[in-house]
Each structure stands twice: as structure tokens, then as C-alpha cells.
Amino acid sequence: MQVAATIPSYQHRIYASLFAIAKAKKSTMASTSNSGAFTTIKERVTFEKEIKKSKFIAIAGPISDDKSAMSFLSQVQDPRATHNCWAYKVGDQFRSNDDGEPSGTAGKPIYSAIASSGIDRVMVVVIRYFGGIKLGTGGLVRAYGGVASECLRNAPTCLVKTKVPMGVEVPFDLLGVLYHQVSSDRCTLTTS
């Protein structure tokens, strides 16, 4: 959304208009669900835990869409493992897979761990090597959800903010004032 404003040549009115536009834009951005900002993980993270002789390895990685999620899955899954269960979340969209475990005992708990962490655009794959002792449905839910949650808790995160283009016309003699104000608000300024 581009906002264009013509600012009059009077000094006081220029400052007032420029700051009014900037403040109006900030309040509009703040009211639109944090302006598309989201928290994600910076890099791939692994967490490993043995539960009743079964080895669980959770691997979390940043993704951008369904295609990158499937690419991440193909990179980290182990065909020798008993199960490669996974879940991912990108905005309001999510998917999960139990990979042969009883329905709802692996993918859903992994997704619940993602949702409760507040992290977005992330995929978690939990690889299980069966150790000979059955865990039961409750045990599987706790195991898959627990290792996914711990993996995300250990992950370094970052806040990603989207850029909102905004156009402003100012007289040449006030360009320095504009540059100063914009740079003090951690904004990016481009000229055209």
C-alpha cells in the first residue's frame, strides 16, 4: 500500500504534516496484527532423547512454504528409522503426519508444540528408532510433543518484520530533515 503526500513549503506545517503521516502510518501498522511480523527460528536445530529404549530425534528448521517444507523433510528424514513424523506451520496453514504411528499420536502433538511456542514458518521432524518397548498412545503423545517442544525451546529465534512501502514528496531543501527522521526510526529510505 503506497501513501503519497504533498507537503506544503511552510516550515512548521512541513514538520507537522511529516510527523502526522508517519504517526498515522505507525498506528495503522500497529493495529493490523503486528503488521505481518512473526517469530521464526534462525537455523536448523536438533534435540535428541531416549524414552524407554526408543531414540527420538527432533529436527526443526525454518521454512517459507509447503514446497520448502517438503524439501526440508526430504533432507532430514531417515529411511532406516521406524517413523519420520512431522508438522509444520506457515501463517494460518499447517500440516502434520503420523507416519505409521496411531492416528493423532505424533503429528498433532508436534504441531501443538509449534503452535504453543509462538514460532511461525517452521517445520519439526521427529525421527523415532523403536527400542522394543511400546509406549501406548499417551506415551507417544508425550514423547513426540515433548521432544518437539524441547527442540523449539532450544532454538535461536528472530523477529521478522515486513516492510511497508510509503511515498512522501518533500521539497529538496527539506530532504535532509526527512533523511534524519527516517533514519532515527530504523526505516529504509529509497529515492526515485
Image (cartoon, rainbow, N blue to C red):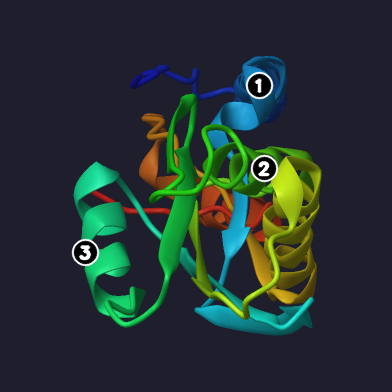
Name which residue lies at 80% across and 43% down.
138
* The quarter of the displayed image where residue 55 is located: bottom right
Q: Is residue 99 visible?
A: yes
In primary-sequence order, the first of circles 1 and 3 is 1
How far from the left and from the top, in percent, is residue 123? 47, 56
- The image quarter containing residue 49 is bottom right
- Residue at 30 percent across and 67 percent down: it is 72
Q: Which residue is mark 1?
A: 33
In terms of secondary structure, where does tag 2 sit? Answer: helix
Q: Considering only vertical position in the picture, is 149 above or below 128?
A: above
Q: In the figure, is residue 23 to the left or right of 36?
A: right
Which amino acid type is marked by label 3? Ser
Query: Which label number is shown at residue 123?
Result: none
Tag nearer the camera, 1 or 3:
3
Q: Nearer the viewer, mark 3 or mark 2?
A: 2
Residue kind at label 2, given as amino acid type: Pro
Residue 30 placement (x, y as % from top left): 71, 24
Residues marked 1 and 2 touching at CB (< 8 Å): no
For residue 88, side relative to residue 118 (left or right): left
Residue depth check, mark 1 versus mark 2: number of the one nearer the observer:
2
Q: Which residue is mark 2?
A: 109
Give the residue pinned by disc 3. 71
- For the N terminus, the image quarter is top left
Residue 88: % across, % down: 46, 46
Whether pointer 1 and pointer 3 mark residues with C-beta atoms closer than 8 Å, the reply is no
